[in-house]
Structure formats: structure tokens, C-alpha cells
Image (spheres, rainbow, N blue to C red):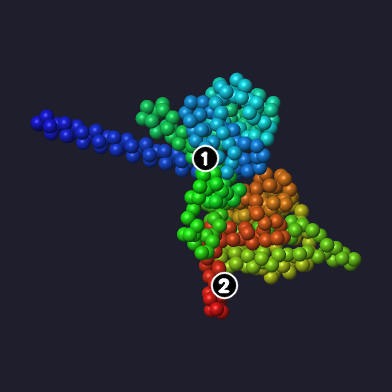
């Protein structure tokens, strides 16, 4: 074989091998990301909630490649409206601890969870009262165990053919940081206009804005769960009402419901999602409201709401992950935490707010139920379909 042909053959073989390895690398990292998606749990939503509620800043730290990732994550938080900065662990240990306060949150990254430089920060941070969130690939590590919240970035193996260079693990850790920042952005209603303000100029061409406002997307972090919901369970006092109780001289109980909620419940049922009420009190007016809004499952005087929820599952034939529960007080929690999604109203008890997957913008009795109904309909592709008859009637009347 001529030398030129031999060189061409070698070059083609080298190119093929290179592309094969590149495709294998990308495919493996994509697989590891997908595996992390299925492992997300309450720890992630708790971390988002803590950052949303943070009165200080998000301080990101990490050694080596974790430090490089931390710088990018801190930058993403800043550009999406959350005050954040990266600080090297050595700098914290040598005087920069004074930059941090009890109102801050430290987000510490370490693949092994055993980085000495990062572990050395735990004790002084706890003395300071700073909340610690960690991202590691080792759930059993000392850093994971010392954290207030630990997020797992564990991978089955690195993409590196030698099994040495951090590759899949760094991709997963960076993606988790992105997911945190975007979920916080969503919770805070961060807008394109606010983005423009942080980036030194208008990024949105207002002359090209659509005449109609785009639909508000459901909370990114629970989009998949929303699509699986077949039953929405509602508490009454504080959710369907504002929580106030009016008693007449004859002992009769009066409640005020919101008309928007009622229509939202009817539309949700029309879109294929059933409704249920589980309430600890007994009231004729609630029964009438249930009948008028298409509630199929109705439990009154349910002091043990978890027991009522279990009976509801047996009656409906649904699985817990197909149910959403909307509550406002601690008596709702046992059932809420069994469901695929736990909704809370902003006037809910603090413990309920801490464990909810989603907190409505509207208060209980002021359209919160309608907000949840629309979130579910949008996620399931039913919102436009349910609104179409009203838009057609409007056009006909004109």
C-alpha cells in the first residue's frame, strides 16, 4: 500500500475513533444527568425554598474543579436576580469568614465530600449560624452529613476512559447548580426586564412583543409531577376560604368562597382531573359548595387526614403520585407529604410552607385554588382548550 494511502487510512481510523469516543462521552454524561433527574426529591425543593427565603447572599465555595464550577454557579445566580459570589475555601479560612453572616447561605461543592479545605469551614460556619447546602457525589461523606441540606451528584462512573478525570460528575454538579438558580428565578417571578437591568441594557425588543401575554408556565421544578396529576385534594378553611370563621347566634357557621376558585374547579374537572375535599370540620355550606363545583370525593369531620387520604386512594384506585394536596396547616401535612405534589397558600403555617413543593401567589380564599387549577391545566395541555369557548363567545358577541 502506498504511504499516502496508508496515512489516509490511519487518519480515517483516528477520526472514527475520536468521534466514537466523543459520542460515548456525551451519551454517558447525558445518561448520568437523566439518572439524577429521577433522584430529585424534597431535599432539592427544600434547598430552593431556603435560597428564595434567604435574606443575605448565596456564597459558593469549592476546591479545584469544584471551585471552577462554583464560580459559574455563583455567576448564574447573580445574573438571575439572586445576590451571590464565589470565595475560595483558603480565603475563608484566612480572614474572609468576616464576609459571611448568619443571613447568608453557603453552597459548598466537593465531588468526594472529603476535601479537607472545605471540611475545615464547617465548624466556623456553624458557629456563625450560616445555613449550609452541599453538592457532593458521596452521600456518606463527612461534608454531606454536616450539611443542613445535601444534594447528591453521584454518578455510576466518570466518562473519562481512564476513570480518573472528573467529567460526568462535574457535568451533573454544574447542572444541579443551574437547576437551583432557575427554580429560584421561577419562584421569585424574575422577569426579562429584570434580566435586562442586570445586564446593562434592554435585551427585549418591546416593539416585537406579542399583543397577548404569553401563558405563565408552571413551576419548572414540578412540571413533570403536574402532568401526572389525576386528583386535586383540597382543605377548606384557609385554602378554599381565608381561614376566618363566622358564627351566628344560632351556632350556624358561615364561610366565604371565591367565585374564581369555583370556576377553576369546574374547568379542572372538565379537563379530566377529579376533585376531592378533606376537611376536619363539618359544615352544610361546604357540602353545598362541593356539590356545586363537581367535587366527587368529600370527607368531612376528618380529624385524621392521612386516614381519610388512604380511604380516598382505595376509593379512587389512584396512586399517591397521581394526587396533589393543597393545605395550610400542620394537620394537612401527613397527607400532603404522601402526595405527588404538596401545594400551600402563602398564609399557611411555617412548617407547611417549608415542606410544600409549590406556594401559591394568591392567598387562601382569594383565588389560590384557581391558581393551582390553572397550573395543572397548563402543564397537561388543557388550559387553551378550556378557555377556547369563552374566547369564541367573546368574538361572536363583537
Identify the image quadrant of the N terminus: top left
Q: Quadrant of the C terminus?
A: bottom right
Q: Tell me the residue that label 2 is attached to.
A: 390
Q: Earlier in the sequence, mark 1 or mark 2?
A: 1
Front residue of 254 and 178: 178
Q: Is residue 385 above or below residue 343?
A: below
Q: CA distance from mark 1 to mark 2?
A: 41 Å
Q: Is residue 335 above or below residue 175?
A: below
Q: Residue at the location (47% across, 55% down)? A: 205
Instruction: Tell me, yes or no, if residue 43 can be seen here.
Output: no
Give the residue displayed 55% in from the left and 68% down from the top. 386
**Residue 19's mark?**
none
Q: Secondary structure at mark 2?
A: helix
- Give coordinates of residue 244: x percent, y percent: 79, 58
Q: Residue at x 54, y 36 (%)?
A: 74
**Count of marks overlaid on the render:** 2
In the figure, is residue 261 to the left or right of 107? right
> Going 53% across and 70% down the picture, which residue do you hit?
388
Q: Position of residue 28 (x, y in %)?
A: 40, 38
Q: Categorize mark 1 by other alpha carbons within 10 Å: few (<14), some (14-19), many (20+).
A: many
Q: Is residue 290 left or right of residue 216?
A: right
For label 2, the crowd category at 10 Å Cα-Cα, with few meaning under 14, some 14 to 19 and many 20 or more, is few
Q: Position of residue 332 (x, y in %)?
A: 71, 51
Residue furthest to the front: 201
Q: Secondary structure at mark 1?
A: helix
Report the mark closest to the observer, 1 or 2. 1
* Residue lying furthest left: 2
Mark carried by residue 76: 1
Is 103 left, or right, of 253 in this rendering? left
**Residue 28 in sight from this viewpoint:** yes
Q: Nearer the viewer, residue 88 or 324?
A: 88
In which image quadrant can residue 241 be found?
bottom right
Amino acid at each position: 500500500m502506498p504511504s499516502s494511502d496508508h496515512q489516509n487510512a490511519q487518519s480515517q481510523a483516528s477520526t472514527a475513533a475520536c468521534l466514537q469516543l466523543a459520542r460515548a462521552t456525551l451519551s454517558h454524561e447525558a445518561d448520568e444527568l437523566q439518572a439524577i433527574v429521577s433522584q430529585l426529591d424534597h431535599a432539592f425543593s427544600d434547598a430552593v425554598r431556603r435560597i428564595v427565603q434567604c435574606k443575605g447572599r448565596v456564597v459558593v465555595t469549592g476546591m479545584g474543579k469544584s471551585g471552577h464550577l462554583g464560580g459559574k454557579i455563583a455567576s448564574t445566580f447573580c445574573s438571575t436576580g439572586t445576590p451571590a459570589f464565589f470565595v475560595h475555601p483558603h480565603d475563608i479560612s484566612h480572614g474572609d469568614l468576616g464576609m459571611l453572616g448568619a443571613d447568608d447561605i453557603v453552597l459548598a461543592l466537593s465531588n468526594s465530600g472529603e476535601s479537607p479545605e472545605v471540611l475545615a469551614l464547617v465548624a466556623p460556619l456553624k458557629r456563625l449560624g450560616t445555613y449550609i447546602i452541599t453538592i457532593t457525589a458521596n452521600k456518606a461523606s463527612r461534608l454531606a452529613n454536616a450539611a443542613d441540606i445535601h444534594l447528591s451528584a453521584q454518578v455510576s462512573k466518570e466518562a473519562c476512559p481512564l476513570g480518573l478525570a472528573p467529567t460526568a460528575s462535574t457535568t451533573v454538579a454544574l447542572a444541579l447548580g443551574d437547576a437551583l438558580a432557575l427554580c429560584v428565578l421561577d419562584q421569585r417571578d424574575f422577569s426579562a426586564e429584570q434580566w435586562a437591568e442586570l445586564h446593562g441594557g434592554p435585551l427585549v425588543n418591546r416593539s416585537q412583543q406579542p399583543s397577548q401575554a404569553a401563558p405563565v408556565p408552571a413551576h419548572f421544578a414540578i412540571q413533570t409531577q403536574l402532568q401526572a396529576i389525576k386528583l386535586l385534594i383540597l382543605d377548606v378553611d384557609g385554602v378554599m376560604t381565608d381561614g376566618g370563621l363566622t358564627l351566628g347566634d344560632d351556632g350556624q357557621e358561615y364561610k366565604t368562597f371565591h367565585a374564581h376558585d369555583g370556576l377553576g374547579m369546574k374547568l379542572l374537572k372538565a379537563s379530566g382531573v377529579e376533585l376531592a375535599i378533606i376537611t376536619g370540620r363539618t359544615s352544610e355550606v361546604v357540602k353545598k359548595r362541593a356539590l356545586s363545583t363537581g367535587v366527587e370525593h368529600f370527607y368531612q369531620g376528618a380529624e385524621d387526614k392521612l386516614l381519610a387520604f388512604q380511604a380516598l386512594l382505595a376509593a379512587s384506585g389512584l396512586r399517591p403520585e397521581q394526587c396533589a394536596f393543597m393545605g395550610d396547616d400542620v394537620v394537612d401535612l401527613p397527607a400532603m407529604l404522601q402526595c405527588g405534589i404538596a401545594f400551600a397558600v402563602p398564609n399557611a403555617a411555617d412548617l407547611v410552607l417549608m415542606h410544600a413543593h409549590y406556594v401559591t401567589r394568591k392567598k387562601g380564599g382569594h383565588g389560590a385554588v384557581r391558581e393551582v387549577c390553572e397550573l395543572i391545566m397548563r402543564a397537561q395541555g388543557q388550559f387553551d382548550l378550556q378557555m377556547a369557548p369563552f374566547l369564541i363567545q367573546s368574538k361572536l358577541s363583537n
